[in-house]
Amino acid sequence: MITNARELLSATQKVFKEWGPLLANFIKDQSDQRELIWFLQEFCTDNKFELLFTYILVDWHKSRLVKAPAIFEWEEEQKTLKGE
């Protein structure tokens, strides 16, 4: 069982190192990537791991699971929701 943020980050990195290429087959376009980012944000928020969100997102970007345009779209949606 994962008990702290460091363990979650390490576990996430291991899982996506092994399963990332398979997952990438299902993440076909920018919209799918953006939805994956939303899922990650919700998961981190619900489980009190908000600080890990950025680290995991950077890992996903480095592994090319999500690309910059999807991240920028997600960021614009965030601004819209916050009323900025």
Image (spheres, rainbow, N blue to C red):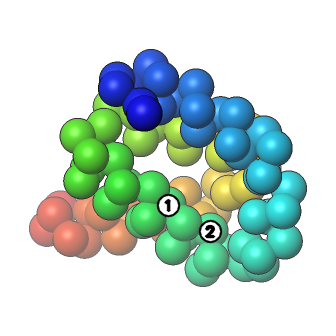
Q: Position of residue 6 (x, y in %)?
A: 44, 20
Looking at the rendering, in which quadrant would you find the N terminus? top left
The image shows residue 56, relative to residue 82, as above or below, that is above
Q: Amino acid at mark 2?
A: Gln
Residue at image coords 34%, 26%: 3
Q: Position of residue 77 (x, y in %)?
A: 35, 70
Are circles 1 and 2 on residues that touch, CB within 8 Å? yes
The residue carrying pointer 2 sits among few (fewer than 14), some (14 to 19) or many (20 or more) residues within 10 Å by Cα, namely: many
Residue at image coords 73%, 73%: 27
Return the residue at label 2. 33
Q: CA distance from mark 1 to mark 2?
A: 6 Å
Front-most of 37 and 71?
37
Disc 1 on helix, strand or loop?
Answer: helix
7 displayed left or right of 68: left
Which dot marks residue 37?
Answer: 1
Front-most of 67 and 8?
8
Disc tally is: 2
Front-most of 78 and 3?
3
Looking at the rendering, in which quadrant would you find the C terminus? bottom left
> Does residue 21 appear anywhere in the picture?
yes
Examine the image and state in which quarter residue 2 appears: top left
Which dot marks residue 16?
Answer: none
Q: Amino acid at mark 1?
A: Ile
Residue at image coords 76%, 64%: 23
Residue at image coords 36%, 55%: 43
